[in-house]
Amino acid sequence: MRISVYDSLDLILRELGKRIQEYRVKMNMTQCDLATKSGVSLRTITAIENGKNSSVESLVRILKTLNLENSLNSIVPDTSEVVTVKQITPKKRYKAPKRVSTWKWEE
């Protein structure tokens, strides 16, 4: 499932937990292995994989242990890599210069 801006927080947490679990299993790691290597408790690993709220520190430790730390750059990009769009000012309409009339009434 692709995470969308329209998804609820609970749905996003469940999807992230599911992805972490799938990645851990593909790396042939048990929850105990991941807990030991990441320094995060087994209870926290279980909670995250079940879509429960956890600390950012725990998430980062888990991602580093799963060799997914590069994915952190896509969460919050480095501002030096952000391309800013130059603010475009609307073009002004061309106005011809006013003509000064040299015409005078004859007296």
Image (spheres, grey):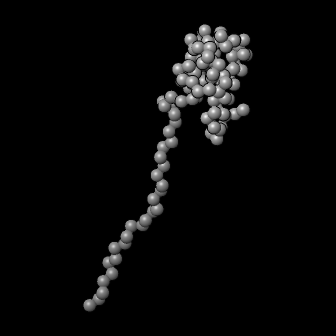
- At 69% from the left edge and 33% from the top edge, which residue is drawn? 2
Q: Would you place residue 31 above or below residue 15 in this image? A: above
Query: Would you identify the image quadrant in which residue 18 lies?
Result: top right
Image coords of residue 1 (percent x, y): 72, 32
Q: Nearer the viewer, residue 45 or 90?
A: 45
- At 54% from the left edge and 30% from the top edge, which residue is drawn? 76
As drawn, the residue found furthest toward the left would be 107
Confirm whether residue 67 shows in the render: no
Image coords of residue 90 (percent x, y): 48, 55
Q: Is 27 positioned to the left or the right of 44 in the image?
A: right
Q: Would you place residue 81 above or below residue 23 in this image? A: below
As drawn, the residue found furthest toward the bottom would be 107
Image coords of residue 10 (percent x, y): 63, 33
Q: Is 73 positioned to the left or the right of 50 in the image?
A: left
- At 37% from the left edge and 70% from the top edge, which residue is drawn? 98
Q: Nearer the viewer, residue 98 or 60?
A: 60
